[in-house]
Image: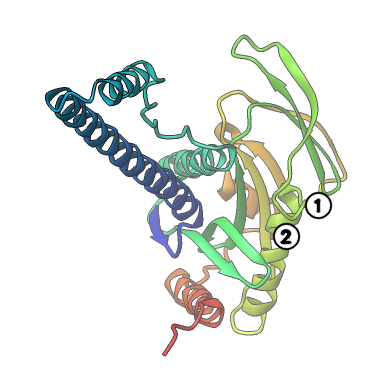
Amino acid sequence: MRTLVLSDHTHDQATAAASKRQADYARALGTYESALAHRAGRSQALIATSRQYFKEGRYFAWLASIVARMVMRFSAPLKAPVIAAAGRDEVVWNAGGDGEQRALDALARQLGDEWVAISGYRNPAGEIDLLLVGPDGVVAIEVKYVNGKVHCEGDRWWRDKSDKYGNVVERNLPITDKKGRGPSAQVNAAASRLQGFLAERTPVRSVLRAVVLSHDQSELGVLQSPTVHAIARLRDFDPGSLVHRILGAGHQLLVDDLVRIITQDHRYHERRTKPKEPR
């Protein structure tokens, strides 16, 4: 299987979050070091002043300076900063990136070079984690790296989270993006727009949609009225069989031409949404 990365939003977000944590730490460290230097300078100044007062016989002033030195000596030490731990969003982005890579690795073991996996295709309706383009069809995949038993009812998705021993520790946790969309709604939005685009320009009339669970502890629960063509654990997902079951075989699509057209569409929308640089 060949691969093509158009964008890596998940990695970019995780990298930006990590860079911000590092920058915040660097600023805090600079403030801390400045405060240390200021305290050291103040201490040296008090010592010099104390000696001067004693030399001049100004004993009350000398005693006052001794008190000031003792106060500084026994004041609370400055606390060195530590870099913040990764926040929830950063953890989720990193996990998502790991899940997508696991999916790519697994699919590469199944599919030959007649297939191309496009990562990070985007249009105004959203992003498709993985877009498989093969001689018999196109499959849009939403990859979810979630631990536990996953359920859905239409476009509403939730999970029962398990611990490392398989015991359920939390139930009915929603699976949504920041817009409140479940995995099926996410992939359907972008796939439907791509389907319309391809139908006007190529022999492709349908973009199949799948939600793939890439976590080792993922399980399938109750799946009622799903709005995608397939929901599967990564180890059970077979895109070739999915295409043949729904679309049939023997289409012999021109894969490289499709990839070129999809890439052009992605670049077009990328240019339209990219902020303009100030003149």
Indicate the position of residue 216 as horizontal and vertical percent values: 55, 25
Instruction: Identify the element where label 2 is drawn.
Output: helix
Q: Which mark is residue 249?
A: none
Q: Nearer the viewer, residue 62 or 37?
A: 62
- Left or right, residue 155 beside residue 126: right
Q: Is residue 138 above or below residue 106?
A: below
Q: Residue shown at 31%/43% (left/top)?
A: 30
Q: Is residue 32 above or below residue 127?
A: above
Quarter of image, res 191: bottom right
The C terminus lies in quadrant: bottom left
Q: Are marks 1 and 2 in contact (CB under 8 Å)?
A: yes
Q: Residues within 10 Å of mark 2 (few under 14, many from 20)?
A: many
Q: Which residue type carries mark 1?
A: Thr
Q: Which residue type carries mark 2?
A: Asn
Q: Residue shown at 34%/19% (left/top)?
A: 67
- Left or right, residue 45 beside residue 35: left
Q: Nearer the viewer, residue 178 or 53?
A: 53
Indicate the position of residue 219 as horizontal and vertical percent values: 68, 26
Which residue is under mark 2?
Answer: 188
Which residue is under mark 1?
Answer: 227
